[in-house]
């Protein structure tokens, strides 16, 4: 795996994990006893914690990338003949 394909694999893993982490811990205003501000959707989370989720996503994606790198370079899964 060269550096470009490794980067592409990491970016794809990062976005997949990020979208999986987005729904965790979100509470809309009506669940916490607040009223949505004018102009905001009633389903918008009170505290989305995007930066925390991005940091957690970065760590998880790095771990998954390490596993993917090991699987690809060890030859467990190969798409090449020989």
Image (spheres, helix red, strand yellow):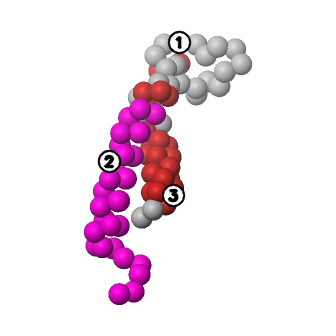
Q: Nearer the viewer, residue 17 or 41?
A: 17
Q: Is residue 9 left or right of residue 35?
A: left
Q: Earlier in the sequence, mark 2 or mark 3?
A: 3
Q: Secondary structure at mark 2?
A: helix
| Disc number placed over residue 34 in the picture, else none | 1
Image position of 81 with respect to 50: above or below: below
Residue 72, by quadrant, is bottom left
Q: CA distance from mark 1 to mark 3?
A: 47 Å
Q: Position of residue 56 (x, y in %)?
A: 38, 35
Q: Position of residue 45 (x, y in %)?
A: 53, 24
Q: Is residue 65 left or right of residue 34?
A: left
Question: How many labels, in total?
Answer: 3
On the image, numbered disc 3 is attached to which residue? Answer: 4
Q: Nearer the viewer, residue 48 or 1?
A: 1
Q: Nearer the viewer, residue 56 or 33?
A: 56
Q: Position of residue 34 (x, y in %)?
A: 53, 12
On the image, numbered disc 2 is attached to which residue? Answer: 63
Q: Which residues are magenta?
A: 54-82
| Residue 16 seen in this snapshot | no
Q: Secondary structure at mark 3?
A: helix
What residue is at 35 percent from the left and 59 percent from the top?
68
Name the quadrant of the C terminus.
Answer: bottom left
């Amino acid at each position: 795996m060269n550096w470009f394909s490794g980067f592409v694999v990491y970016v794809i893993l990062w976005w997949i994990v990020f979208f999986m982490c987005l729904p965790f811990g979100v509470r809309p205003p009506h669940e916490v006893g607040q009223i949505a501000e004018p102009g905001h959707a009633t389903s918008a989370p009170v505290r989305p914690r995007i930066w925390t989720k991005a940091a957690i996503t970065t760590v998880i994606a790095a771990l998954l990338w390490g596993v993917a790198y090991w699987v690809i370079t060890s030859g467990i899964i190969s798409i090449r003949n020989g």
